[in-house]
Image: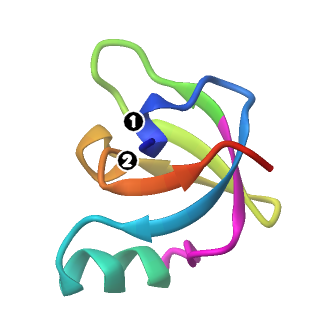
């Protein structure tokens, strides 16, 4: 399951990134690390970003990036 498929309000665990080294580096700089828990706060309308919360911080991710973050919904 990808982060883009997660329902609003759901808590998930980040498992891995389905992208190149550049994407992984960018996501790690934002504080997204495999094994961390994240909550989807909202999916913006009209193809806008996905807003997530990690460690008390809100991060907006484009839908393309969110579709490359693999998560586990079974916590």
The residue that mark 1 highlights is 49
The colour scheme used here is: rainbow
Residue 28, compared with residue 59, is above or below; it is: below
Q: Residue at x 33, y 79 (%)?
A: 24
Q: Residue at x 47, y 84 (%)?
A: 29
Counting from the top left corner in percent of width and height, residue 45 is at: 40, 14
Q: Residue at x 28, y 22 (%)?
A: 47
Q: Label the magenta part by its dominant secondary structure.
A: loop
Q: What segment is highlighted magenta in the picture?
A: 30-40
Whole-number angstrom distance, CA of label 1 to CA of label 2:
8 Å
- Is 35 left, or right, of 56 in this rendering? left
Please report whichever mark, 1 or 2, sits nearer to the chain's N-terminal start. Answer: 1
SS class of the residue under badge 1?
loop
Q: Residue at x 30, y 54 (%)?
A: 68
The residue that mark 2 highlights is 66
Residue 61, compared with residue 4, is above or below; it is: below
Counting from the top left corner in percent of width and height, residue 36 is at: 70, 70
- Is 57 left, or right, of 16 in this rendering? right
């Amino acid at each position: 399951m990808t982060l883009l498929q997660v329902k609003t309000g759901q808590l998930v665990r980040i498992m891995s990134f389905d992208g190149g080294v550049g994407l992984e580096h960018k996501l790690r700089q934002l504080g997204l690390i495999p094994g961390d828990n994240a909550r989807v706060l909202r999916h913006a309308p009209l193809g806008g970003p996905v807003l997530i919360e990690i460690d008390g911080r809100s991060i907006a991710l484009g839908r393309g990036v969110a579709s490359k973050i693999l998560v586990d919904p079974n916590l």
